[in-house]
Amino acid sequence: MIRINLLPQKREARREGGQGWLIAVMIVVVLEVVVLGLYHQLKLQDLAKQRQVNQELDAQIAQIQSTVKNHDEVRQKLSVLRAREEAIAKLQAARSGPTAVLLELSRILTTGRGPTIPDDELQQKRKDSPNDVHNLGWDARRLWLSSYVEHERVVKLEGWAVDGEDVSELARRLALSQYFGDVVLLPGNRQTETATKMNVVKFQLQAKVRY
């Protein structure tokens, strides 16, 4: 009979199995360390990028704050400048406006001339309402002014005319003019003019001036 002792072999197998398990554990640990190291490196890169973005945002915020720092002051200065421009514009209009209106009135009261109105608009009025168009043949010497008073863009005219049609012609011309509007004939009456001793119509007329 042959006997074989297997005990030493079992011990050797157990020893090899233990070493293999230890190696596997070490490999797993090393892999975890490597993975964690890579993850940490990625997070550090993300953190660096985020810090760079934050720095850029801080720089933009600082620039915006510097830009709007004097916003109220700048807005106040702009408001003052606009007020000055409006005041200057009003002064210029007040200087040139009355002069232009008086020149227009002079044209209206000149024989052979008439009010300032675009030609196409005048032609259309001749077609639509010819009675509202001025008479080119009117003799402006049949009417003369004795008073011209303007207050807050409202002018009041007073004067004398040979008859009521002359007054109506003046009102038509004023109504057609670009410089006048809202023309209203006020009550008048026939009187004897002191200087000429003529029996004439004393009239009053009111209108708004445009300038």
Image (cartoon, rainbow, N blue to C red):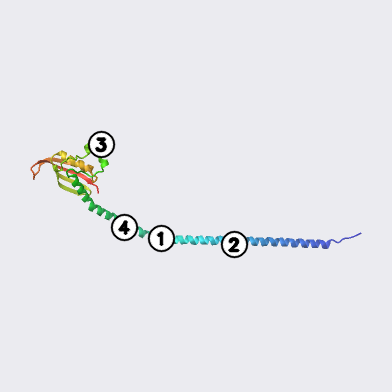
Q: Where is residue 60 in the image (x, y as percent from the top left)?
A: 45, 60
Left or right: 111 in relation to 54? left
**In the displayed structure, would residue 14 be above or below residue 102?**
below
Under mark 2, the amino acid is Gln
Under mark 4, the amino acid is Leu
Foreground mark, 3 or 1, reads: 3
Which of marks 1 and 2 precedes in the sequence?
Answer: 2
Bin the neighbour count of mark 4 within 10 Å (Cα to Cα): few under 14, some 14-19, many 20 and up.
few
Q: Position of residue 205 (x, y in %)?
A: 18, 43
Q: Distance between the residues labelled 3 and 2?
A: 90 Å
**Helix or strand or loop: what does disc 4 sit on?**
helix
Q: What residue is pinned by disc 3? A: 127
Which of marks 4 and 1 precedes in the sequence?
Answer: 1
Residue 67 is labelled as 1
Left or right: 153 in relation to 197? right
Residue 81 is labelled as 4
Which of marks 2 and 3 precedes in the sequence?
Answer: 2
Front residue of this view, candidates 39 and 113: 113
Q: What residue is pinned by disc 2? A: 41
| Marks 3 & 1, CB-CB < 8 Å contact | no
Q: Distance between the residues labelled 2 and 1?
A: 39 Å
Which of marks 4 and 2 precedes in the sequence?
Answer: 2
Q: Distance between the residues labelled 3 and 1?
A: 62 Å
